[in-house]
Amino acid sequence: MIEPRFFSKPEPLDVDRLLSITGATLAAGSAEGLAISGIGPIDRAGPADLTFLDNPAYAADLAESRAGACLLAPKFLDRAPAGLVALVSPEPYRAFARVAAALYPAASRPQPVFGAGVAPGAIVHPDARLEPDVTIDPGAVVGPRAEIGRGAVICANAVVGPDVRIGRDSVLGPGATVVHALIGDRVILHQGARIGQDGFGFAMGPGGHLKVPQIGRVVIQDDVEIGANTTIDRGANRDSVIGEGSKIDNLVQIAHNVVVGRHCVIVSQVGISGSVTLEDFVVLGGHVGVVGHVRIGMGAQIAGSSNVREDVPPGARWGGTPAKPVRDWFREMTTLKRIASEGRSRPQSEAPEGSPS
């Protein structure tokens, strides 16, 4: 553990518990006395730590690792040094994540600073409805007719607006705000997330821009995670929807009427314009921009820094500006690189007529 100050020291896990959590298989060799009480990278983990190996780029570090145990793919098993307890898994990183969550459950979501119950300094409207075991930190505000489910946590200075519903075991990080929204169960909103503010809707004209009232909602389904300072606008005349299990990074802007499908992944600094639809399992790399009224098909992947301006077929892999199939994008980049290289190598006397000298 690099910095023990911020997380409680976990109870050690023996090999039987590790196998139960991960579903891994114990490779031949002794695991007597194994007690894992921490996690670490393969080159820094110590004898009481669990590490993992999934990426071939780090395979060379395995021979020198001092870790007590390592979750690894079968293809790396013959590289494990003597004395290392090898736990074989087809998905080492996912297995490692399960162990990390068991050791450090508080690291998985924002934590209250005051403790269970409604803290002094919290403001809860008398018409709000709270199920048992709700935690509300100092400075948090819960508006009239809001409903908050059992086990939910509302951290310091978070705001739950009038008529908002927060599902069970969900958490609003410090400073998060939710208005005009329905939030499902086990949803995580990190610090400063803004959910349900009005969308950017104006009727443009030479006499000035007339604001269009935004009367939709934001609907966030179960098991969604939304990063710090991400904003999701409510719909203009229908709902903005974030589908079950989707994961959204920090600093993402999602405009009004956007529908994000189930289990999508949206990386930081993505901007999604109004009325875009992402079908299930779509991945948007960092800094992707999507123009309005576009549909991105199921399972499609968009490379980072791309600009999507037309519909993307299901399962496609696109990149570039404007975005296109990656094979076309790579071909264009290769051609441009060749032309630029030829231009640099051309003698001055062969420069085209009218070109700068």
Image: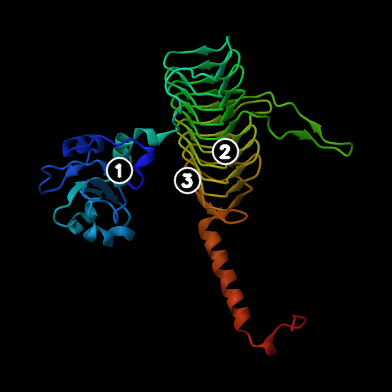
Task: State the residue in front, 30 or 317.
Answer: 30
Q: How many marks?
A: 3
SS at mark 2? loop
Circle 3 packing at 10 Å, graded few (<14), some (14-19), many (20+), is some
Colouring rule applied to residues: rainbow
**Residue drawn at point x = 16 percent, y = 43 percent:** 34
The picture places residue 244, in percent across and down from the top left corner, at 46, 30
Calculate the distance from the C-alpha at mark 1 to the C-alpha at mark 2.
27 Å
- CB atoms at circles 1 and 3 under 8 Å apart? no
Marking on residue 96? 1
Residue type at mark 2 is Thr
- Compared to 75, does 281 lie above or below? above
> Residue 74 at x, y = what percent?
22, 51
Tag 1: residue type?
Answer: Phe
Using the numbered discs, state the Cα–Cα distance from disc 2 to disc 3 in whole angstroms.
26 Å
Q: Residue at coordinates 29% horizontally, 54% vertically from top-left?
A: 42
Nearer the N terminus, badge 1 or badge 3? Answer: 1
**Residue most extreme to the top:** 127
Q: Which residue is mark 2?
A: 230
Local crowd at mark 2 within 10 Å, few (<14), some, or many (≥20)? Answer: many
Between 329 and 268, the residue placed more toward the observer is 268
Q: Quadrant of the N terminus?
A: top left
What residue sits 82% from the left and 35% below the top? 209
Q: Which mark is residue 315?
A: 3
Image quadrant in which you'd find residue 185: top left
